[in-house]
Amino acid sequence: MKFFIDTANLDQIREAQDLGVLDGVTTNPSLMAKEGISGTDNILKHYVDICNIVDGDVSAEVISTDFEGMVREGEQLAELHDQIVVKVPMIKEGVKAIKYFTDNGIRTNCTLVFSAGQALLAAKAGATYVSPFIGRLDDISTDGLNLIAEIRLIYDNYGFETQILAASVRHTMHVLECAKIGSDVMTGPLSSIEGLLKHPLTDIGLAKFLADYKKGN
Ligand code: E4P
């Protein structure tokens, strides 16, 4: 299972990269705005900065909602760095754009996916990644993890190569459950990755080992 971090914060990306288990980064316009990154030139530069920190795929989202605009933006983003994956929303024009990018060797991440039908369409269009937003489904009392399971079943039935990128991951249990279901990738905050480290028995055990060492030295 690949671990992506869902942020545009360079310090957090560096911290996750330093841990040695990071496989990529996802961003979105809200995450860029949160870091105060605005204006096309600054946004494009920020994507390059991210690519220079992480070894792996970096999702960069288009803003246009029409086919021509998405293609124009996506081609510009893809030219920035070979680690860039163009993030395209699951709308009709987006499906057309994903097909276009697939046919032209540009990798894509189909975002804002909330149903198995949308995920099937993304795979048919040849998306590299599909991003079901599990946290936002949970927020409206719908089982986000169940969507991951449905997509896994459908993709396995037909051998689709589109990778399931569980997005809107909020905590460590989301990560673990996605791993059990067989999600190819998860993207979440640094805390969802670091939470995997924690167990009280580890802390108690280490404290005892260190105390016993001190006694004998
Ligand atoms: C996915 O790529 C999105 O950037 C992200 O996971 C959305 O998460 P949120 O629901 O926490 O905003």
Image (cartoon, rainbow, N blue to C red):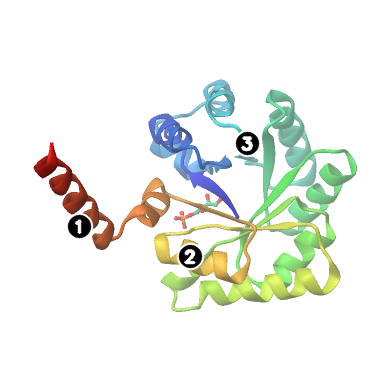
Write down the residue under mark 1. Answer: 204
Q: Secondary structure at mark 2?
A: helix
Q: Judge whether 137 appears above or below 190 on screen.
A: below
> What's the residue at 17%, 53% (across, down)?
208
What residue is shown at x 69% (from left), y 31% (from top)? 77
**Number of other residues with Cα within 10 Å of mark 1, as a class: few under 14, some 14 to 19, many 20 or more:** few
The residue located at (60%, 68%) in the rendering is 114
Q: Secondary structure at mark 1?
A: helix
Mark 3 — residue?
A: 56
Amino acid type, mark 1: Ile
Residue at the extreme left of the image, as rendered: 215
What is the quadrant of the N terminus in the image?
Answer: bottom right
Q: Percent from the top left, x then y, of residue 24?
A: 58, 40
Residue 153's disc number = none
Residue closest to the eye, 97 or 154: 154
Q: Secondary structure at mark 3?
A: loop
Mark 3 vs ligand 1: CB below 8 Å = no
- Looking at the image, is 156 positioned above or below residue 161? below
Q: Which residue matches tag 2?
A: 176
Q: Earlier in the sequence, mark 2 or mark 3?
A: 3
**In this rendering, is residue 18 above or below 107?**
above
Q: Amino acid at mark 3?
A: Gly
